């Protein structure tokens, strides 16, 4: 296990169970966002996201779920994801231990063909849970979205006395539409399942206040810690892979070298092409001068 960072932002490069057991105090975290391997065969830098059978995957998940519940404060919130095929198991396992307040669908479009002989998967489920349904943070005013009846159609609600215009803003429902992170987006990092900044912004704004601590036990590209820092929250990120942890060291700790290694991302192919085009253009200009 390797540890990086400072008191406000910590990065642990190591195994989730080991770090949770040995490094994180019980009842110390305000918000946990969990986006684990989904057991669907992704390739995490050579580490296979596929267990021998479903039971083995679930036994492993229940182990870190139990630990996470211990780390959460009594007033804390947990957002937990997995694939559509495994979320029912998480739901049933969690509902006796914590209050599940929302079953969220993160919906996105895809220009590519998903499936030809069945309905392709275009969403990922998220369970929003709290330890105490009478005492948890939910900053509804910080996450309001447009309410079209009032804002676009400008309708008046005549059932009210006196009649008044419909609200122009509302608290979002449980279907969230955010595009997936694509290669050409500025936030893109080299990781197969990077979550968008916009998704984490809504979660962190809703469920924490400035100075609160946010934990992400499967950090990947460290989007959670990056957004937490931007919003003046504290962060703890755990990630087993060394290369992904370096993304965190750059994105969260804003450290661009580690033991002499440059942590800046590779230029994107279209940027290289532009550079080549630029060079050709300059060469032509020089030739013509
Ligand atoms: C679904 S991805 C998380 C993506 C992340 N939410 C993001 O926005 O980039 C799951 C991550 O868990 C990491 N991981 C897998 N097994 C782990 C373990 N035993 N301990 C810690 N991290 C692990 C993988 O390397 C992968 O980066």
Image: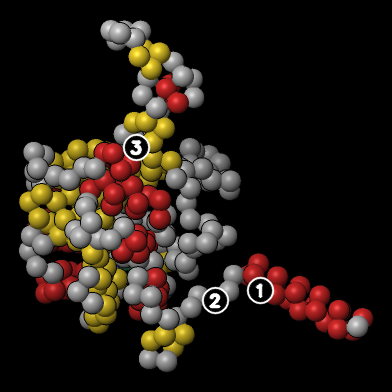
Q: Is mark 1 within 8 Å of ligand 1?
A: no
Which label sits in the foreground, 3 or 1? 3
CB within 8 Å, label 3 to label 1 = no
Residue 144: mark: 3
Ligand 1's quadrant is: bottom left
The residue indicated by pointer 1 is 272
- x 28%, y 61%: residue: 232
Instruction: Tell me the SS state at disc 3.
Output: loop
Which label sits in the foreground, 3 or 2? 3
From what the image shows, is residue 96 above or below residue 209?
above
Q: CA distance from mark 3 to mark 1?
A: 40 Å
Q: Dot 1: within a 10 Å radius of its alpha carbon, few (fewer than 14), some, or many (20 or more) residues?
A: few
The residue indicated by pointer 2 is 266
Marked residue nearer the N-terminal end (1 or 2): 2
From what the image shows, is residue 157 above or below residue 95?
above
Percent position of residue 89, x then y: 22, 46
Does 188 sit left or right of 277 as displayed?
A: left
Q: Dot 3: within a 10 Å radius of its alpha carbon, few (fewer than 14), some, or many (20 or more) residues?
A: some
Residue 188: mark: none
Residue 18: quadrant of the picture: bottom left
Residue sitting nearer the eye, 109 or 274: 274
Does 99 sit left or right of 124 as displayed?
A: left
């Amino acid at each position: 296990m390797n540890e990086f960072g400072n008191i406000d932002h910590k990065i642990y490069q190591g195994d989730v169970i080991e770090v949770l057991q040995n490094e994180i105090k019980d009842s110390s975290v305000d918000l946990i966002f969990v986006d684990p391997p989904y057991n669907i065969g992704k390739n995490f830098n050579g580490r296979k996201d596929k267990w021998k059978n479903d039971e083995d995957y679930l036994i492993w998940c229940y182990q870190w779920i139990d630990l996470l519940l211990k780390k959460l404060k009594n007033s804390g919130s947990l957002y937990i994801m997995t694939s559509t095929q495994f979320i029912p198991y998480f739901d049933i396992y969690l509902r006796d231990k914590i209050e599940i307040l929302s079953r969220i669908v993160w919906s996105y479009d895809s220009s590519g063909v998903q499936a030809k002989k069945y309905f392709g998967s275009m969403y990922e489920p998220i369970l929003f849970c709290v330890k105490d349904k009478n005492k948890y943070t939910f900053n509804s005013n910080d996450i309001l979205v447009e309410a079209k009846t009032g804002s676009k159609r400008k309708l008046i609600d005549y059932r009210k006395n006196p009649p008044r215009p419909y609200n122009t803003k509302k608290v979002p429902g449980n279907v969230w539409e955010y595009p997936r992170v694509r290669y050409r987006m500025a936030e893109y990092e080299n990781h197969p399942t990077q979550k968008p900044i916009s998704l984490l912004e809504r979660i962190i704004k809703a469920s924490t206040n400035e100075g609160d601590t946010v934990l992400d036990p499967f950090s990947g590209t460290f989007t959670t810690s990056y957004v937490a820092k931007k919003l003046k929250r504290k962060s703890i990120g755990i990630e087993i892979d060394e290369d992904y942890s370096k993304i965190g060291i750059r994105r969260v700790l804003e450290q661009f070298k580690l033991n002499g290694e440059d942590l800046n991302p590779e230029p994107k192919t279209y940027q290289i092409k532009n550079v080549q085009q630029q060079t050709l253009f300059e060469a032509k200009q020089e030739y013509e001068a």
